[in-house]
Image (cartoon, helix red, strand yellow):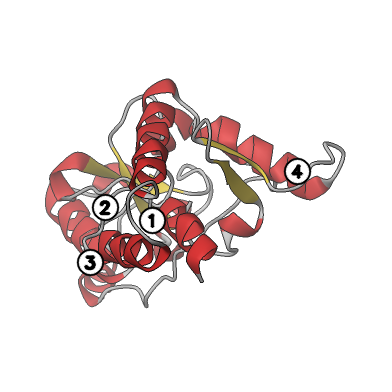
Amino acid sequence: MLKITKTLDPIHHVEFKKKRNPKSWDDYGPDIKSSLKTHMLDKEQDGYCPYCERMINVDTSHIEHIEPKHKASNYKAYDNMLTSCNDPQTCGHAKKGTFSNDFLNPVLIEPMNFLKYKFETGEIVPSKIDESHSDYQKAQFTIDTLKLNEKDLLASRKVFNLQIANMCTYMDDEAVKMALKGYLEDKLNFKTLIEFHLQNYS
């Protein structure tokens, strides 16, 4: 999961709310949704789904409300919006309206302080080992809610890890480091996984 730093509410959204005075999310049409997704992807998310870290675009995404949009004015609160992938098995679609204080809100905290990778399997797991610890419970709740270890997603991360392991058999450390930095620049899937591999060469 990525930490997301929100910008100020985009002016086109501020003007939309002022002129249209939307009463619910149903009052948001395709034009305003598209412009919001474009802004979030370009200015805040670097093209990634903040949950699974796969690259997405305006056509392969939807606006995800971190806290349920049917509560109070959550539907129009810009800090409550992310742009999530359209995978029906994971992320925003898997989460639906699920929310609790245990959810790792990537706008408020750095999720990877609570999560880590198992390179052998591609799994995302809690960084804390103690199951009674609140950090463990928050991590596991978030993993389960977003289905971050869904089989296809898990398989993709495992394949990537195997590619890195194979690369290490014929390239020296500096060459591997440069390759990983290139992956980040090219915006390959799984940004924090690439960063985790890079830590081995820092």
Q: Nearer the viewer, mark 4 or mark 3?
A: 4
- 4 or 1: tag closer to the N-terminus: 4
Q: Residue under circle 4?
A: 136
| Dot 2 crowding, Cα within 10 Å, few <14, some 14–19, many 20+ | some
- Label placed on residue 153: none
Comparing 132 with 105, the one in front is 132
- 3 or 2: tag closer to the N-terminus: 3
Residue 156 against residue 71 in the figure, above or below:
above
Q: Quadrant of residue 4?
A: bottom left
Q: CA distance from mark 4 to mark 3?
A: 32 Å
The answer to whether residue 116 is seen in the rendering is yes
Q: Residue under circle 2?
A: 188
Comparing 96 with 73, the one in front is 96
| Dot 4 crowding, Cα within 10 Å, few <14, some 14–19, many 20+ | many
Q: Secondary structure at mark 4?
A: helix
Q: Residue under circle 3?
A: 42
- 3 or 1: tag closer to the N-terminus: 3
Residue located at (56% from left, 54% from top)? 105
Residue 97 x %, y %:
50, 34
Residue 177 x %, y %:
38, 65
